[in-house]
Image (spheres, rainbow, N blue to C red):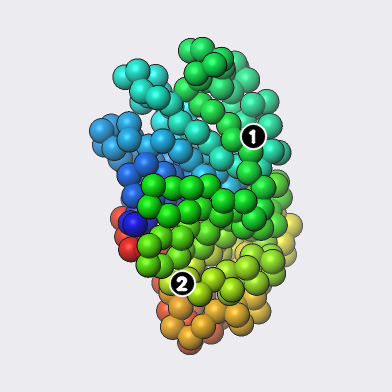
Amino acid sequence: MLLTALGTAAGIGRGVATTSFLVDETTLIDCGSGVGSLPVEQLEKIERVLLTHSHLDHCGFIPFLADCHAYRDGPGITVYSQPETLAALRAHLFSGVLWPDYTRLPDPAKPWVRLEEITVGETVQLENGTATALPAAHSVPGIGWLITGPKNAFAFTGDTGPCPAFWNAVSRVATLSDVVSEISYRNKDSANAERFGHLSAEKLAPLLDGLPDGMRLWISHLEPGRETEMMAEIRATLPSRLKVDAILSGQEIVL
Ligand SMILES: Nc1ncnc2c1ncn2[C@@H]1O[C@@H]2COP(=O)(O)O[C@H]2[C@H]1O
């Protein structure tokens, strides 16, 4: 199983895009602007989106992805997330105002976007592994994802503030090789991190005790233009026994 980072940033700018990870050829974790870097032939192969939460930097490209199927008579996509997140997509994104209601078009029995509820602890079967919803603590209802492949497992926090339940869950996964955690704010802005349901390095550090030495801990959701400054602080704050690095577009992880 191959995981490819398409977009990993908190915002946009040259060379950076918002959250989207490709799992093999058919699954996306989140559908931010990063997905737009894929050629059309690859976009058409995507069957499902594992969505962490309803904020636009994570779900805003779902209509355009669905359009790849709409234009070419494809089967459409299935979006898996919590009931509150799916309700937000129905009410706001596919309201018929921001975008036509692709959850009922072209035919309510066979729409371009199918919404499937999933709750924390439930698993989606993938072609070559599984995806399990993990807890998160954001300003809107959110989840993380655990992707288990034939050899290794990968965990993604999604957008979250401190969430001990996430870190307890991943520390029990024997095959875990890589974790991607968001850090959106510098330590001096920890109060804002807390206010908006995000992490700074000093808020993440106490949660990492359950990770074994040498675990790869990738950092996502950095502020565009501040990556170098933030990573210097993050490396100085997080335990040196972990392999800490920024995850950038194009990074591949074999599971
Ligand atoms: N009052 C607020 N509550 C939550 N988010 C806010 C607020 N004001 C500004 N924001 C920004 O809105 C963004 C929404 O997406 P994020 O959670 O990634 O990050 C959030 C903050 O950067």
Say which quadrant the C terminus sits in. Answer: bottom left
Horizontal and vertical percent position of residue 147: 47, 58
Q: Mark 1 points at which residue?
A: 86
In the rendered structure, the answer to whether residue 57 lies left or right of residue 190 reads left
The CA distance from mark 2 to mark 1 is 31 Å
Q: Could you tell me if residue 246 is visible in this image?
A: no
* Residue furthest to the top: 107
In the rendered structure, the answer to whether residue 54 lies left or right of residue 59 reads right
Residue 59 position (above or below residue 185): above
Q: Which amino acid does label 2 sit on?
A: Thr
Q: Name the residue under label 2.
A: 175
Secondary structure of the residue carrying numbered label 1: helix
Horizontal and vertical percent position of residue 203: 66, 72
Frontmost residue, 126 versus 227: 126
The structure residue drawn at horizontal position 39% and vertical position 47%, both measured from the top left corner, is 127
Q: Nearer the viewer, mark 2 or mark 1?
A: 2
Horizontal and vertical percent position of residue 176: 47, 71
The structure residue drawn at horizontal position 41% and vertical position 31%, both measured from the top left corner, is 65
Some atom of ligand 1 lies within 8 Å of the CB belonging to the residue at label 2: no
Secondary structure of the residue carrying numbered label 2: loop
Q: Which amino acid does label 1 sit on?
A: Leu
Horizontal and vertical percent position of residue 1: 34, 57
User: Nearer the N terminus, badge 2 or badge 1?
Assistant: 1
